[in-house]
Amino acid sequence: MSTKKTLNVAMIGQGFMGRAHSNAYQQVNHFFDTNFNLYLKVICGRDREQLKGIASQWGWAETETDWRKLIDRKDVDLIDIGTPNNLHAEMAIAAAEAGKIVLCEKPLAMNVAEAERMVQAVKGKPNLVWFNYRRVPAIAFAKQLIDEGRIGDVYHYRATYLNSSGLNASRANTWRYSKATAGSGAAGDLLSHLIDLALWLNGPITELCSMLKTFVPGRDVDDAAVMMTRFANGSVGTFEASRYGTGNRNRNMFEIHGSKGAAVFNLEEMNRLQFFDVNDPSELSGMRNILVTGPGHPYVNQFWPPGHVIGYEHTFVATLADFLKAMHEGNEFHANFEDGLKVQGVLEAVEQSAAKEKWVALGR
Amino acid sequence: MSTKKTLNVAMIGQGFMGRAHSNAYQQVNHFFDTNFNLYLKVICGRDREQLKGIASQWGWAETETDWRKLIDRKDVDLIDIGTPNNLHAEMAIAAAEAGKIVLCEKPLAMNVAEAERMVQAVKGKPNLVWFNYRRVPAIAFAKQLIDEGRIGDVYHYRATYLNSSGLNASRANTWRYSKATAGSGAAGDLLSHLIDLALWLNGPITELCSMLKTFVPGRDVDDAAVMMTRFANGSVGTFEASRYGTGNRNRNMFEIHGSKGAAVFNLEEMNRLQFFDVNDPSELSGMRNILVTGPGHPYVNQFWPPGHVIGYEHTFVATLADFLKAMHEGNEFHANFEDGLKVQGVLEAVEQSAAKEKWVALGR
Amino acid sequence: MSTKKTLNVAMIGQGFMGRAHSNAYQQVNHFFDTNFNLYLKVICGRDREQLKGIASQWGWAETETDWRKLIDRKDVDLIDIGTPNNLHAEMAIAAAEAGKIVLCEKPLAMNVAEAERMVQAVKGKPNLVWFNYRRVPAIAFAKQLIDEGRIGDVYHYRATYLNSSGLNASRANTWRYSKATAGSGAAGDLLSHLIDLALWLNGPITELCSMLKTFVPGRDVDDAAVMMTRFANGSVGTFEASRYGTGNRNRNMFEIHGSKGAAVFNLEEMNRLQFFDVNDPSELSGMRNILVTGPGHPYVNQFWPPGHVIGYEHTFVATLADFLKAMHEGNEFHANFEDGLKVQGVLEAVEQSAAKEKWVALGR
Amino acid sequence: MSTKKTLNVAMIGQGFMGRAHSNAYQQVNHFFDTNFNLYLKVICGRDREQLKGIASQWGWAETETDWRKLIDRKDVDLIDIGTPNNLHAEMAIAAAEAGKIVLCEKPLAMNVAEAERMVQAVKGKPNLVWFNYRRVPAIAFAKQLIDEGRIGDVYHYRATYLNSSGLNASRANTWRYSKATAGSGAAGDLLSHLIDLALWLNGPITELCSMLKTFVPGRDVDDAAVMMTRFANGSVGTFEASRYGTGNRNRNMFEIHGSKGAAVFNLEEMNRLQFFDVNDPSELSGMRNILVTGPGHPYVNQFWPPGHVIGYEHTFVATLADFLKAMHEGNEFHANFEDGLKVQGVLEAVEQSAAKEKWVALGR
């Protein structure tokens, strides 16, 4: 009776992101009225036994251990890549060339060259990079405030992504801590999120100067990535991403200071946005601690009544919903591979700047 | 191939709770390895058109507008009641007498007499009252700290449930604001949550003295319910529930002060628990702001890696998971109808005390 | 050259309050342009040796161990009483009868009878009770917001004064923990502050119901005092004062919820006021975290430029400045002995209500 | 009868710092048992009328409008310089050469050359730079934690000093916004504080890369100063000072992350220190919100009992007390002119780095 079109989904990846994306496919039509039925066709990974458990747990119809077999299947419409970074390009390009809809985890690629080929490959086809934080309601609300002029001319954009995963020996042994599989450390893992949000919220970066630091001898990726930037809008940027931010679990934070107002966000308090309005009478002015659970806030009408907080995974659900909507309406979705390429461009400049110890200009 | 037993679920209720429970049935096996397949057989409500939409959205196989028809169906194993309070007793008793597993929203009943009959009806059968907040990880963690003796002898238990729904004309027009359908106002709606948590965390209340207040002329339920209590453990209790707590969205908060430590929780910061340890050196002591997302915290291993917050609906998911586990293992689950009856007993004493303007002793 | 009138001050008390008042006399003309020179003539206490140290430290010209000798001295204009509570009445009445300006620490007296005699004695003469918290800039600002109608019709007034002095054996051995010297425990020490603020900010209490609790066997004063109140303005009050509020150092806190706004204060964050404005657009509304250090805030122009916080002792300085101003202008100052008597009336009702376990109506 | 030595003080400066220092001279012996009587002999400034008011208000015996006259006076022991920065060097050198004890506001000088001459001039004589924030009890406590090894090996040191003075036209018109009188903008005014604290808490900076930004066309000083640093201890530093930090009044903040713990301070919550202990059991770990008002905390025994907050001016009082103690005992005091010179060295490197847009190495 449903007139929704069915999309057969293949997921590559069986880790944290495999679970988070599985949840999105299962939940998106519960919260959003999309035009698609999503059929969880096949999940692909290397560990056959574990894969069966995940498939059973999350409702995937089939399992597969050879990702190349997915490419040729006619009964797969959409391929979602949640693997280590070094596999993104090959998989995404193959999938795109086979005519699939391609979704890919961030960072998009190992470098700009890869990212450019990926962008070429998906040209004209729906594509997405999982910069999921754009759909945190509080962040989407910050974007709305900026677009409405409530921040005014921006003076400062300050972003930090601090966790303490480096202090945890068991976490520091995964593919994310190796150059061969991750390309970089905190830069690709954490700073990439900050960059995507910054470009979206505050516009292009024109120049940057960075420092990369590895605290553990012998490790071949950065543990911390720091940079100063100049934005095209004249504002000053500072960025810091670290896996050695003792005492912080998942502090993805930004602050923006402007001539009309200011906003502060911290992922550890994901349902909050701090907002300061310069127009408030001076004696009544202070950071407003806004619980961004509606009414009037982005996305939250889809979830629960005002005052009922949502969690991390809803950012994937809302991202997927927006992607499906754009695809249905024939509109361009963001963050797409082009956005992923832009982030990659900044990441590459970060590496150059750190290596040469000087400022680097970014082409636009 | 699965050896899980299938339970056919019938849900009565198509509002906020209908959605929240639907989510729990859909999600429980994604996060918990239960011994049951939950088949969303039929959802029941009065508004046929809206019902179809909800069924389609949440994956219910059938819809029904006459709840009595569910009772006799052999293909329904479990009946979940998410209706206005005045319907709980009749539905639950009929369902129980037909041999169904019965789950019921809180408050369990309109009064103690109803609740007692309900308890009788479900005797020997699995049953549950949706006091979902017991399964907020941070609250379950507080319970664990208390049980481990980290709070010590309790001096004070202080609980507030403040929202500002009363200031919102559109919300103040629902069944929750009428005696005929809700039985009481803030007392049954909000104070009941505080009471259940208090009895669970701090043990029996022996005496109480209360005040009920209606701010809006002509309204026949309380807008605010306040009480002082004596607990069996010698501690002093204060409770305040209000729909006129301007500036608060969903502040379900408790504080517990003891000889060894203190803990503070606020639902608006659902993933946090504040904890104070008297054993810390004096100069290093302060409330610890704990992000209760693991490792080592209740439930959270089921959800996302440490630092990734969960939302309101996970409390229903975890409640359901524990219920299914207890049922599988033949153990008693809490909060069950007996717990619901205890809360009802306190609520009735609240009404008596407020009406007579005096202290009331509670039988145990 | 100065045209200021000199007041010779005699201070009775050599403890914490002796120091805090000494500071006020030394500092008031540094921050406020009063019409008086304050000459620190004589400090009086029982411990002669310690007294000499304090006199030397704080610039008192003389010391005295017999307070009665102060009464007859012509060269003493103002007597300030900072002794244990049981001495207030006798000293204040003697001083007043000798024509002195009388200032007295809170609570004013041991009971209403004493307080009434004290009010009689000071009639027509300048007098003050040291309810210093009225002059916390953030609290004075809250009063201003209330008077401007920014809170609107009040629904709730909630006050807590929690410290953990009871857990500290060395503090629990002082005169404040004995009925003979203090009259009561947490009630007179802490609850009295809450009552004075409540009467000032929210108007008269018409009825109350209270509970007093002593956690330590054998102690003859209350360790905690709790009450529910009805205010003349129709709002509901809850109060809790305790010396067993583990984890709190000096949490003198109030919250006020009304039809137009809300305000929250906590002495541990003395330079802050939280304010919620119902008129803010819903999606932009949240508690505003106001740093009450100016511009536009009460008193703070006297102290430091905006953003520079002040400390506890400034409340005494500002209180004294206002007192001197009122005296110079011939206006009535508050909090005066009449205000102290009102608090005493509520405290007496608290004791009656707790003893009889019932509601008590307050005259007026 | 007192055996204290009297010091005749001359203060140059009649603005905010003139008041703050006057307060320190008046208060130091009230809170600390120093070995000196401080006689407020003469205050010097350009505005004769205003000066009289200040002298009368703060108890200075005389006024003077020509600072050179102070130099030759035999009855002046100590000269305290609270003037615009461009006057520091000449005054300090003249005072030192005349044998005076010299105290000087920060930043010490307009440049390194001046600062070096000043250091030469005071060699062998007691001298002080008013880096008052070292004596915030919470900051001194952080230093103690670091020295005790509770932070461990440092990974990150992050400091921000944000106010919004630039948005306030009336403040943006003072000497602090002109190169001729201030030397620099946010750098000398705000960043200098951050640098002094960083050098004290985290040791020498070996290299830095900076950016200076002026938002207002035509202004000849920086509105914001940002830098990345490498510390000798291997940690990564980031610094940001701005007068355009909308929404912040006086956010002098630092965070330090190490292998054993972390600490966070913010001047707007001056009586607090956040502390994280890696040794806490993982599930019980969280930032501890410590109210640094004793017991066991630096300085606070001098002020009020635990739980009673102190204000901004106490940092000057404690600084002066420590200076007098060091002078009495013949010990070196910090921050002295040598410390001021070190800060000047960093500030000069900041200017060079910003001008050349490259990393600059610092001599040690």
Image (tube, coloured by chain):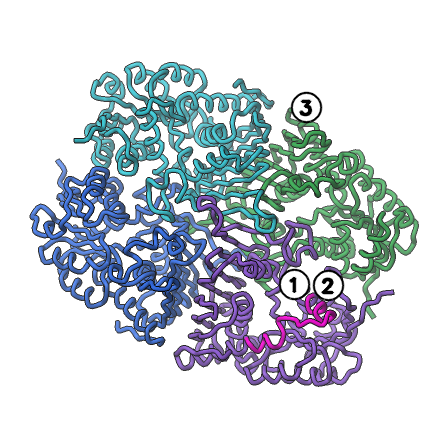
Chain colours: A cyan, B blue, C purple, D green
Q: Position of residue D260 (x, y in %)?
A: 50, 45
Q: Is residue A345 toward the left or the right of residue A37 in the image?
A: right
Range of magenta residues:
C322-342
Q: Position of residue D80 (x, y in %)?
A: 81, 50
Q: Badge 1: few (under 14), some or many (20 or more) residues near its Cα, within 10 Å? A: many
Pointer 1 residue: C313
In what quadrant of the picture does the C terminus of chain B appear? bottom left
Pointer 2 residue: C27
Q: Are marks 2 and 1 in contact (CB under 8 Å)?
A: yes
Mark 1 vs mark 3: tell me if same chain.
no
Instruction: Quote the CA–CA distance across marks 2 and 1.
Output: 10 Å
Q: Badge 2: few (under 14), some or many (20 or more) residues near its Cα, within 10 Å? A: many
> What amino acid type should be assigned to the residue bearing mark 1?
Glu
Pointer 3 residue: D356
In this rendering, is residue B278 above or below D69? Answer: below
Q: Badge 3: few (under 14), some or many (20 or more) residues near its Cα, within 10 Å? A: few
